[in-house]
Image: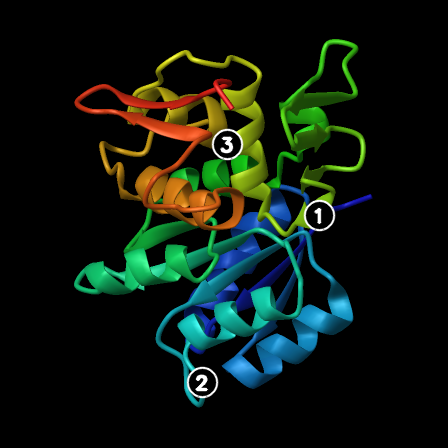
Amino acid sequence: MAKVILIIEDEQTIVDILKFHLEREGFVCHGAGNGLKGLRMAAELNPDLILLDIMLPGIDGLEVCKRIRAQGSQTPVIMLTAREEEEDKVFGLELGADDYVTKPFAMKELIARIKANMRRSAAGTGTGGENALRYGGLTIDFNSMDVKKDGKSLELSQKEFDLLVFMAKQPNQVFSRDELMENVWNYEYYGDARTVDVTVRRLREKLEDNPAEPGYIMTRRGAGYFFSINN
């Protein structure tokens, strides 16, 4: 079955260009010209991925992303941002966006990021016969994609789950930001490590008793991050 992409973008020319190229790749595309319509279509269509412009009439893309995540949706969201909106990129990631692409973007790069973000954990984080990992009070279930801490389920985004699984399967091994970008995001991120830092921060907020003094996702200064099993 073809994957469905919802494009929330108010510039019809951009929507038409995106539809033309993405439909050639075999995707089914739907467009929404404003934030409220985008929210309604996201609920109705349950798309496989959302392309979300930040600058929208009515409610902007940041608010749309916030509401989508508040509804419990884990659909991958790629923000479309203008080059001068640097702070909005980081804010979008903090609100739950999985990725962002800066306008004007190369279609080849965008398609690569769409495909990377659509890879679900069942395909991208093979368990080698294991069904779950358990470290102290933490349980990571691969089949259900559920993470429990002391018996309580944690609401993780797809990327947060992928990052946790990748590091937890190789405990106490330090990974640089570039290595995490290559293995978890599955493409080069052109040296921008902020998305790794933001995802780690969001994961710590959900996983750790005290995010300021983490016990699972640790930092090795000047080297990167690692998953500690000394709990």
Q: Is residue 125 left or right of residue 200?
A: right
How far apart are the alpha carbons under marks 2 and 3? Answer: 30 Å
Residue tagged 2:
59
Asked if marks 2 and 3 touch (Cβ < 8 Å), the reply is no
Q: Which one is nearer the viewer's eye here, 164 or 183?
A: 164
Q: Which structural element holds mark 3? A: helix
Earlier-in-chain disc, 2 versus 3:
2
- In this rendering, the answer to whether 37 lies above or below 72 is below
Q: CA distance from mark 1 to mark 2?
A: 34 Å
SS category of the residue bearing label 2: loop
Amino acid at the residue labelled 2: Ile
Q: CA distance from mark 1 to mark 3?
A: 20 Å
Q: Residue at x 43, y 49 (%)?
A: 202
Tell me if mark 3 has few (under 14), some (14-19) or many (20+) residues whose alpha carbon lies within 10 angstroms of its own: many
- Amino acid type, label 3: Leu
Residue 143: % across, % down:
80, 30
Which element type, helix, strand or loop, lies under badge 1?
strand
x and y percentages locating residue 93 in the rendered image = 39, 55
Say which of marks 1 and 2 sits in front. Answer: 1
Question: On the image, numbered disc 3 is attached to which residue?
Answer: 163
Give the mark nearest the N terminus, 1 or 2. Answer: 2
x, y (%) of residue 160? 52, 41
Viewer-side label of 2, 3? 3
| Rendered image: mark on residue 164 | none
Residue that numbered label 1 is attached to: 152
Name the residue furthest bottom: 58
Q: Quadrant of residue 191?
A: top left
Q: Amino acid at mark 1?
A: Lys
